[in-house]
Image: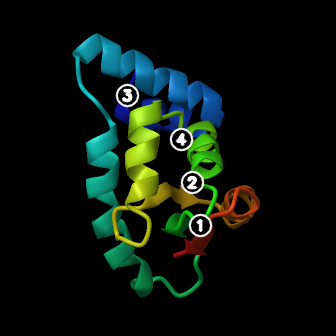
Amino acid sequence: MTREELIQAIKEMTVAELAELVKALEDEFGVSAAAPVAVAAAPAAAAAPAAEEKDSFDVVLKSFGAKKINVIKVVREITGLGLKEAKDLVEKAGTPDAVVKEGASKDEAEELKKKLEEAGAEVELK
């Protein structure tokens, strides 16, 4: 399988399938994907202003509001992260590292924003 075929196969996965794949890779190689995801958010956010018509959005937590536990549950559902990783991500709300989802389509980003806001979070699409 070429790199392009692998990338295409990953693009076609559902969020749940992708979460299972990430977990399997973490188990297989003894690593955690939580830190690289947060680090990768900064370059993506910096490159975004160059695009004229955005077709890809980052879903960023600005605040977790009064219902932190509900927000953590939704973040776990969206990302497939474990409890500790989801809690750490939620607690980074308001920082550049609080990216819940990178490169989402406009429709997906709006849906994720709605879910997070229903849980009590304040969300920004970049």
Q: Nearer the viewer, mark 3 or mark 1?
A: 1
Task: Please give the residue where the numbered disc 2 appears in the rendered image.
Answer: 68
The residue positioned 59% from the left and 66% from the top of the image is: 65
Q: Quadrant of residue 106?
A: bottom right
Relative to 21, say whether 28 is above or below.
above
- Disc 3 packing (10 Å; few <14; some 14–19; many ≥20): few
Amino acid identity at mark 2: Lys
Q: Pointers 2 and 1 in contact (CB under 8 A)?
A: yes
Upstream in sequence: badge 4 or badge 1: 1
When asked about the image quadrant of residue 76, the answer is top right
Q: Which of the marked residues, 2 or 4, is nearer the chain's N terminus?
A: 2
Under mark 3, the amino acid is Thr
Residue 107: % across, % down: 75, 62
Q: Secondary structure at mark 1?
A: loop
Q: Which mark is residue 78?
A: none
- The residue labelled by disc 3 is 2
Say which amino acid is labelled 1. Answer: Gly
Where 53 falls versus 36 (above or below)? below
Q: CA distance from mark 2 to mark 1?
A: 6 Å
- The residue closer to the viewer here, 49 or 85, is 85
Amino acid type, residue under disc 4 in the picture: Thr
Q: Nearer the viewer, residue 107 or 50?
A: 107
As helix, strand or loop, the secondary structure at mark 3 comes to loop
Which is closer to the viewer, label 4 or label 1? 1
SS state under label 4:
helix
